Image (tube, rainbow, N blue to C red):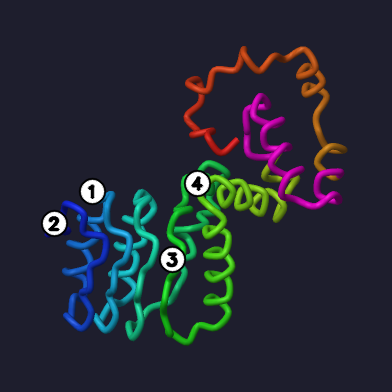
Amino acid sequence: MDLPGGNIRSLMLGDNKLGEEGCSAIARALRNNDNLEFLYLDDNQIGVIGLEMLADALRTNSSLKRLHLKHNSFQLKPLIRCVFNEESVESVADSNHSLKHIFLNCGYEYESDELEMLMKLNRLGPRLARRKKVAMFLQRDLDRRLFGLGLDLKLLPYLLSILSDNGNLDSLLRVVKGVPSEVSSYRRYRCDEFDAREYSMDIEFL
């Protein structure tokens, strides 16, 4: 299945009984489409497996802004993971920061609130949403996530700058108190000596 090319920005596929097979085709198409902004998939018998396929494809799609999934049957964890993957700071940075609205009425009130909060962050724009999600990720377990995951210390000042911009003062003070002595060497560190190509992490968000 190929999504329409050219200037097509909106696609309505509601009430088509897509199921898993249809979701698989749409997911493949989403990975290769950078024009579509609005996708309507209401009433399509989409379950957990189908949703996981769509969510996985959306992690690398940066054009879709609005997704309609009303009257389907699934839990929302795949969607939440798509826009806020907490496996690592790298996965948070590589989450979807461009999808701004998801419409559903699945009855999972708590998860819907969490998803809506993440959508509000995305509506701030990709760069700011990315930085705020990284700050939120770090704040949830500062000691382990900053110092216990083997992060290269050269990245630490950039992560601290994200916390200072988007975190709270208590969190920042806790991190500063826990900074290892090796970080003192950063006083002699010049930004023009830092080569982002040495790192597997996409550090655009830093």
The mark nearer the N terminus, 3 or 2, is 2
The kind of residue tagged 3 is Leu
- Spot the residue most to the left: 1
Would you say the residues marked 4 and 2 are in contact, meaning their CB atoms lie under 8 Å apart? no
Would you say the residues marked 2 and 1 are in contact, meaning their CB atoms lie under 8 Å apart? yes
Q: Is residue 43 left or right of residue 170?
A: left
For disc 1, the neighbor class at 10 Å (few under 14, some 14 to 19, many from 20) is few
Q: Residue at x 50, y 46 (%)?
A: 91
Q: Residue at x 39, y 61 (%)?
A: 65
Instruction: Identify residue for label 2.
Output: 2
Single out the mark in the foreground, 4 or 2. 2
The mark nearer the N terminus, 1 or 3, is 1
How far separated are the C-alphas under marks 2 and 1?
9 Å
Q: Which mark is residue 97?
A: none
Would you say the residues marked 1 and 4 are in contact, meaning their CB atoms lie under 8 Å apart? no
How far separated are the C-alphas under marks 3 and 4?
14 Å
Mostly what secondary structure, the magenta segment? Answer: helix
The kind of residue tagged 4 is Ser
Q: Looking at the picture, does residue 165 appear above or below residue 112? A: above
Q: Quadrant of the N terminus?
A: bottom left
Q: Is residue 149 magenta?
A: yes
Instruction: Identify residue for label 4.
Output: 91
For disc 2, the neighbor class at 10 Å (few under 14, some 14 to 19, many from 20) is few
The mark nearer the N terminus, 3 or 4, is 3
Magenta residues span 147-173
Q: Looking at the picture, does residue 83 appear above or below residue 146? A: below
How far separated are the C-alphas under marks 3 and 2?
23 Å
| Residue 98 pos. (x, y %) | 44, 54
Q: Is residue 86 left or right of residue 15?
A: right
